[in-house]
Image (cartoon, rainbow, N blue to C red):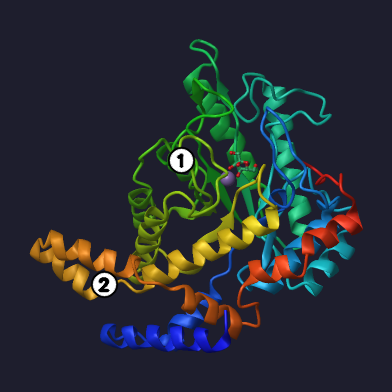
Amino acid sequence: MSTDFHQKSVSLFSEQLVDKGIDLNQLVSQVSGFQIAVPSWALGAGGTRFGRFSIGGEPRNLEEKLDDIGLLAKLSKRTDAVSLHIPWDIPQDVQAIRDKASNLGISFDAMNSNTFQDYGQPLSYKMGSLSNANAAIRKQAVEHNLQVIEIGKTLGSKGLTVWLADGSNFPGQAHFRNALQGTTESLQEIYAGMPEDWKLLLEYKPYEPNFYHTVIPDWGTSALICRQLGERAKVLVDLGHHLPNTNIEQIVATLMHQDMLAGFHFNDSKFGDDDLSTGSIKPYQLFLIFCELIGGAMDGAQAWESISWMIDASHNTKDPIEDLIQALESISQAYAKALLVDRVKLTQCQLDGDVVLAQEILQDAFLTDVRALVREARIQSGGEADPLAFYRKEKIREKLIAKRGKNAQASGL
Ligand code: PSV
Ligand code: MN
């Protein structure tokens, strides 16, 4: 892409904005300011139960994961935080990790606990963790979460994300109400152990790894539990954790209406996977979600700053860094397009019952090519015009393989 061509695209775009009364500089600074955290588990090749195919040069420890995120931050200028998973990422030398992250301009987003695997703890989570019928197992899971909070405190994190695999595979296996009650009480203990300036982000998921029932299957159950914890407990929306065709944008609006939206885990889903690249399957849905987010914040339903943003995906087939570059780009594009919606006209259409024009207004914003704008925002922030092209031209994966080895496998996962 020549600089000349880019400048022409930006000025063309700028002319389109004049009609809408939108200021280009303001738009650029909004897009530049939107930062999305990256999870530590996104840097290695993921896997399925059928196999795992290493990409080579994967980060072998937390330090190398930070290096990869630092690189991503430098190229894209769209991320400035990492979300750690315990026990996958227990820092051995906290001060050294803090210093390294701060040198790379990276802070520590919400911490993630893990009560869905057995990793040498005395009691097994096979039959559940915070919901387990056995009080000793619930206690062990609560204590794990409290340890995660302690580690997070040393790193300067301000939140705890809880995702539970708890549920059952067969009718009769679990007692629904007891499981919910046990989970709520366990979470109350965890919430009480959080510092006053932390928030608890509670995920939901309709199925997987359990296929008959999940203890927190949907946003409503998550919200009911959060209400019993306190006002710093809110619902985390992971885009891949919905049954097909769920109206996620409406869920977002409802949660914001109640000031109950903790944040996002960005990814995409075609059938039931929750790991496809953000915006690769349903970009219009992503755009509509951002329309609700912006609308909710503008109307004062919930403050924009109170919402956390993170990518949650792990890939079996792509180079993880390339995938993250693509995901950050898609999210920025959806956000930028949603900023273009003519809200005054849209509100008028809703009052007038003008369905056709309302659709036109949304489509007009969605169909606007914002790639030059997003690129300009990145250039002005000091990033690469085209991070993906740069990554390939500089043969960064090849260099990582040379440094870390062809069979280097990401730690943790
Ligand atoms: C599993 O579905 C999951 O992707 C959840 O979304 C969590 O956020 C993540 O794993 C890490 O525990
Ligand atoms: Mn998630």
Q: Position of residue 184 (x, y in %)?
A: 54, 34
| Residue in the image at 39% along x and 69% along y | 337
| Residue in the image at 83% along x and 54% along y | 62
Q: Position of residue 25 (x, y in %)?
A: 45, 88
Disc 1 on helix, strand or loop?
Answer: loop
Q: Is residue 104 left or right of residue 329?
A: right
Quickly name the residue at label 2: 343
| Residue in the image at 79% along x and 67% along y | 101
Residue found at the far left of this picture? 352
Q: Quadrant of the N terminus?
A: bottom right
Which numbered tag is attached to residue 207? none
Q: Position of residue 94 (x, y in %)?
A: 86, 59
Mark closer to the observer (1, 2): 1
Residue found at the far top of this picture? 172
Disc 2 on helix, strand or loop?
Answer: helix
Q: Taking the image as drawn, is residue 109 in sight?
A: yes
Q: Quadrant of the C terminus?
A: top right
Quickly name the residue at label 1: 270
Q: Is residue 67 above or below residue 193?
A: below
Cα distance, mark 1 to mark 2?
Answer: 30 Å
Q: Position of residue 402 (x, y in %)?
A: 90, 58
Within 10 Å of disc 1 (Cα), the crowding (few <14, some 14-19, many 20+) is: some
Within 10 Å of disc 2 (Cα), the crowding (few <14, some 14-19, many 20+) is: some
Picture quadrant where residue 352 is located: bottom left
Q: Is mark 1 within 8 Å of ligand 1?
A: no
Q: Is residue 354 left or right of residue 1?
A: left
Q: Is residue 137 above or below residue 244?
A: above
Q: Quadrant of ligand 1?
A: top right
Q: Mark 2 is on which residue type?
A: Arg
Label 1 with label 2: CB-CB less than 8 Å = no
Q: Mark 1 is on which residue type?
A: Lys
